Image: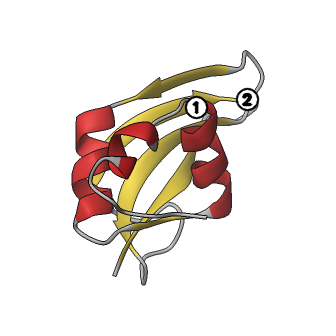
Amino acid sequence: MVKLRLKRCGRKQAVYRIVAIDVRSRREGRDLRKVGFYDPIKNQTYLNVPAILYFLEKGAQPTGTVRDILKKAEAFKELRSNQIKFN
């Protein structure tokens, strides 16, 4: 099973990549694909929406934090047209 989760980058300041990763891998493990970037300090987000939609359509489950980031960026609006429902 594939999940969309945060992968920490940066030593002193917490900066995260949003990655598609196998559920059995650890947080810093090898990812399948980098699909976004999140900086909570500067409140910046970059999302590769086509890649995210591809993984969601294939059955990937976002973690709670990634789900909140995607909702804030309104990435789920495009999924509703395909009738995939996330809470």
x, y percent for residue 72 = 63, 33
The residue sitting at 25% across, 61% down in the picture is: 57
Q: Can residue 9 be seen by looking at this rendering? A: no
Decide if residue 7 is on the left or right side of residue 39: left
Callout 2, which amino acid? Pro
Decide if residue 25 is on the left or right side of residue 15: left
Q: Which mark is residue 52?
A: none
Residue 6 lies, with reference to residue 26, above or below; the image says above
Towards the viewer: 27 or 73: 73
x, y percent for residue 78 = 34, 39
Q: Residues within 10 Å of mark 1 (few under 14, many from 20)?
A: many
Q: Residues within 10 Å of mark 2 (few under 14, many from 20)?
A: few
For disc 2, the marked residue is 40
x, y percent for residue 70 = 54, 41
Callout 1, which amino acid? Tyr
Figure quadrant of the C terminus: bottom right
The residue sitting at 21% across, 52% down in the picture is: 54
For disc 1, the marked residue is 38
Q: Quadrant of residue 59?
A: bottom left
Residue 63 lies, with reference to residue 9, above or below; the image says below
Q: Quadrant of residue 2?
A: bottom left
Where disc 1 sits, the SS reads strand
Decide if residue 10 is on the left or right side of residue 59: right
Task: Mark 2 and mark 1 in contact? Answer it, CB < 8 Å.
Answer: yes
